[in-house]
Structures are given as C-alpha cells and as structure tokens.
Image (cartoon, grey):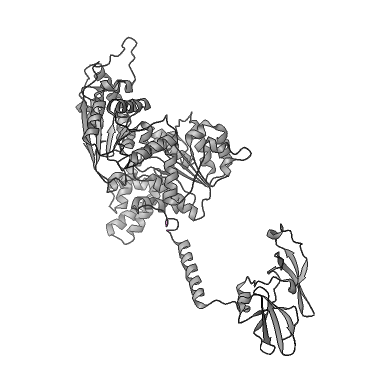
Amino acid sequence: MEYVVGQRWISESETNLGLGIIINANERIVEVAFLSQEVIRSYSRRNAPLIRVNYEIGEEVSHKKGRKYLVDSIDEVDGIIHYFVSPLEDESNQEDEILASFSEVELAHALQFQTPETRLLYGQIDKNRWFDLRYKTLELHSNLLRSGCKGFLGPRVSLIPHQYHIADEVCHRHFPRILLADEVGLGKTIEAGLILHQQINAGVVQRALVIVPENLLHQWLVEMARRFNLTFSLFDAERCANYEDENPFETEQLILCSLDFLMDHPERQEQLLAAEWDMLIVDEAHHLAWLPDAPSVSYQLVDQLASIAPSVLLLTATPEQLGPEGHFARLRLLDPHRFHDLKTFLQEEKSYIPVAQCAKKVIQHEVLDAENETLLASLLGEEITRKYQKSVQDKNEDIHKLASTVTSALIDRHGTGRVLFRNTRKNIHGFSKRILKPIPCLPPQNGALTLTKDNNTSPPLREVLFPELPCEEDSRFTAIIHLLKQYRSEKFVLICADPSTALDIDAGLRIKHGIHAAVFHEGMTMIERDRSAAFFADPEESCPLLICSEIGSEGRNFQFAHHLVLFDLPLNPDLLEQRIGRLDRIGQTQDIQIHVPYFENHPQEILFNWYNTALHSFQQSNSTGPALLNEYQAELEQFIFKASSNDTPSKSLKTLFHASLPTECS
C-alpha cells in the first residue's frame, strides 16, 4: 500500500478516533494524526490496520471550516485526492468562502459516512444487539402503521363500544362527511375527537376548524387538550386584531371559534373562507336555520366552508328539532348532490320506515313475507331477492355475506345512507334511572288570564304558561327553598328559559335566604360562565345550586350532580331532553332526581301532564316527541288557552293524551 503524507485514513480497530491524516511515512513506520481526538498513532507499514477514505461522486463532504459540499467530480494528483464540489443549498447563508474544490487534506476531521455501504466498507459496524433492537423497533413501527387502530391509541377516554364503532366506521372512509346525531349524553364530542385524532395521526388532516356556540368554547378547548392532546387555538375578536397584514386563520393549524363571533364580524368570514381546511366540525348544528328561499347567514357561511373542506362533521343531538326541513338542510351540507331538493327528500322520507323494516328482517336472516319481498324486488331487483329468499330457506353458509350485500345496497340507495349516525339510549345499557319528583304548587292569586276577545287575539303561549311573578308571590320559588333545605349537602342544577328569570331567582335566594348560587346565562362573558360552572363543580366551595338560562341546556356536562330542577318547561320535547341530558349522560353514577314545580289547576299542569302522561319524557328519552308535538300541537294549545280562560274544551285531556301516546307506550 502506498502511503503519502496528507492522505486521509481511518483506523479499522479504532473508528471512534475519527478521520486521520498521515503526517509521516517511511519504509517501516506510518504515523497518523487523529486531530479530532488529538491523538497520534504509529503503525507498522506492513500490517497497519488502516482503511483509505475516498468519497464518491454524489456524497456529502464537510470542509474543516464547517461548510458542507456535494462531490461533483474527483481527481488524484501525486496520491492526494482533490474533490470538485458544489455547496449545499442549506449552507448558502454561511459567511465562509464558498470553494469550488479542495484536497482531502482540508476535509473535516470528524468521521462522516452517510450510506450503509460506506459504513460497512469502512468498518463502522455496531454490535448485533443494537442491530436487533433497531430491527424490532422498525418492525413494530411498521405494524403500527398498518394497524386499523392507528390513531385510536392515545386518547384518554373509556373504551365505550358505540363510540369506537362510529369512529372506526368513519375513519375507514376517504374524506368523511357525516352527521353525528347520537341522543343527548352519548358522547358526540368524544366521537368527533376520536375521528379528528385518528385523521391527524394518519396524516390525512393537518388543518381543522371547529365552530361551536360561544358557551361551549372552553369545554371543547379543554376536552381536546385533556383527552386527545390536541392543542387548539381559540380565535376571537381580540386575537384576530393582532394580525393586520395577514390572514389570522392561516397562522395556526387547529382553530376553535364561536359562531356568534363569526356572525358579528363579517370581515372575518371572508378570511375564514380564504384559508384552506382539511376538516370542518360544527357542534350544535341544529342552530343553522334554513328555509328553501331564505337560508340564514350562519347557514350560508357553513355551506361555503363545507364546499371547500374535504371532511365535514356536523354534531346535533336533535336532528329534527327544526322539523324535516332543518334535517334536510344539514344533510344538504354534507352531500348537496344526494340531497338537492326538499320536496324530493320529503317524498323519499315516507318510504324510509318500510325500507328500514325490510332491512331489519334481512339483518336477522328472516324469510321475507310477500309485502317485504315485493318491496325488496322493487328496490334491488327480482334476481337478488329470489337469491336471498332461497339462501334463507336453505340455510346456506353464504347467507351472512349475501345479507350484508343486500343491507349495504339498501343503505346506500335508500334513506339517508351512510352520512347519518344516531345511537339511541334504548340500545345502550348502563344509564342511571330517571326519577320524577313532581311538585304541585298553588297557582298565582290573580287567577286565570283573561283573553282579549274583541279583536280575536290572545297572549303568547309562553305568557299564558309562565306569567312573570315576583319571587315572593311565586309558590315555585318557595318549593325550591324547601328542596335546598331538604338536601343540604347535595348539588342542584336549575334550568329556566329566560336570563331574567335566572337573575330573579338568584337575587331572591341571596337577599332573602342567604343562599349563594352560581349563575349561568347569556348576559355573561364566556370566562364568567366558565368561572360559575367551575365554582359550582368545586367540591370545596359547597355551592348548592347552579341557575342556568336555556343556554345551559346545551353541551355542558354536570353529571357530578344528580338533582335537576325544571323551573319551567320548554315547548319542544327535544329541548326538554337536552335539559335532562346535562345530568343524564355517560359518567352519571347515581339515579337522577327530576324536580318539576308547576301550578295546579293552571295551564302549566296541562303541559306537565303532556310530557309525563302522554310522552313519558321525564322517565325516558322519547325520540317520537317532536313528531307527536307536530301532529297534536294545535289541539294541545287549544286546551292550554281554554284552561287559561276557564272555557270547557270539546273533549277531555285524557282522550288527547291517549291518542298521542307513542306506540310502545300505548
């Protein structure tokens, strides 16, 4: 081997010494300086354990001054290698002089080999145990990437089957667009978080926008951080004001904002639409009002966002709270081609029930009767119908596969398809009991309201049901005092319709009885509402009561309490279910005591009996409530108005209530 002063070699037995340079070579001895370690080694020329360092074209080399280059060509003169190089782009901002070529003498003294081939050639070999460790690590990483659970490993949530079923079903889709419509308390926020978390970890989603009612901002912010380790940025007027020369919505990847904020600042809507989004999530989507000729401004904004975001999740526990038109409007946001015409949708909706009944028989592998056989043949054709009937009768092994094919075809072609997911309480076990505690109270002393019959007008329905009374004249207020004294060590949530009512109750309790309650209403800022909720939840504060206006009936979780006071009753059954759902939800450990004070011999008693006797809404969730109200609302209101004027109705309430009983109750 020819050794020349200035050549670069490495020690085969001591690769940790770095890149050496020959400083002396004679017939017997070779001296090599390893300058990175400040060591000089002398070797016998005949059997020196040295390996020549020769970088190839395309490899990266480092100059002793620190700049990195790419080897373009190589030349050797008198045993010394000269490298013709070009600087790397990421090194162009250094102050050192850029060289076009240099000899191997000027190479950096640290050992630098990038490719496995050069590491093997120059003897940079680790011990077997480190290779085994790397191999097992890469194997496990590969298995994780191929696992169907990727993205679901990490959230701090309970393993609840119905939530993971929906998340798994949705995450297997390319750009999912769905309506999560589980009944109140079943965990729609967790389901949305599972889907978003998985999509981010799988690399499908990078930028996500979550739009929620203002009173739910803090809850979403905390839930996403605490349960999914997703750090959202909260955008409001104050934050956006800090960005004058750029679009504020392009400064963060995960953004949370309120619908109210966007409606109050139209200029922010334009910036929101100018940004790119991978996923849009809208909570309490039933607030998006829509009519065929007059969609609300909020609906139009979400419609525009849904048209540019590949993935859309809409959340609502009451999909038909605004009637079938509102339900169609939300489905239209998800799939405007499938749900393009309201009239067509309403006509199709009439056939959903028989199709669902037919699908149920197919799922259970039952032989279809003549009616269902005719229906299935009209939907999917006679050939597949005959094939299914024969497979069921012969009990063929392929019946499972065939039934799955038929069911999938029915789902995709008829009904709302795969865009709607709704779990109901009757199919999920583990909920606490609801125990109704009616509290009949003396009616107001002024007696029944007198209707103005001269111009055939009457007071509004809510005014008839819930007249404004001072606390000292309202027997329901006295009932609340007795409740708080009876259960001194327990927490109550009281919900009423108007903020003024909540403030009056709070003032009456504080001034006349020295009871300090937490208040939660629209007139408070988001921070003030969060502080009130935290004050009520803190076990050390001993706050016995949280008084909420209707804003507290959506989204908030108070399952640590098990006493609910309904100071007045809403006119919509879905809204009543939302109120009860603040306590009756997953995580509730005790039976829920529902206290309902109402005036005896008063229109309030009719409304109470409507919910209790006809709909059974206090004892259980009733999905048919809105439909029954829509059918019997005129008759119910007639009874209420006649009761307020002491008129005798044409038929008894018992007849009306029996007629309006849900099928499973009657």
Q: Position of residue 267 (x, y in %)?
A: 57, 33
Which of the two residues, 189 or 244, is positioned nearer the viewer here?
244
Whether residue 109 is visible to the viewer of this picture, yes or no, is yes
* Picture residue at 31% right of the left edge, 26% below the top: 511
Which of the two residues, 434 or 405, is positioned nearer the viewer here?
434
- Residue 651, placed above or below residue 196: above
Residue furthest to the top in view is 454
The stretch of residues the image draws in magenta is 148-153
Which of the two residues, 365 or 138, is positioned nearer the viewer here?
138
Residue furthest to the front in view is 38
Whether residue 662 is visible to the viewer of this picture, yes or no, is no
Tell me the quarter of the image containing the C terminus: top left
Dividing the picture into quadrants, the one containing residue 315 is top left
Q: Position of residue 435 (x, y in %)?
A: 22, 38
Q: Position of residue 202 (x, y in %)?
A: 49, 56
Residue 344 included in the magenta stretch of the image: no
Q: Main secondary structure of the magenta part?
A: loop
Tell me the quarter of the image containing the N terminus: bottom right
Total marks drawn? 0
* Picture residue at 43% right of the left edge, 45% below the top: 222
- Residue 101, placed above or below residue 477: below
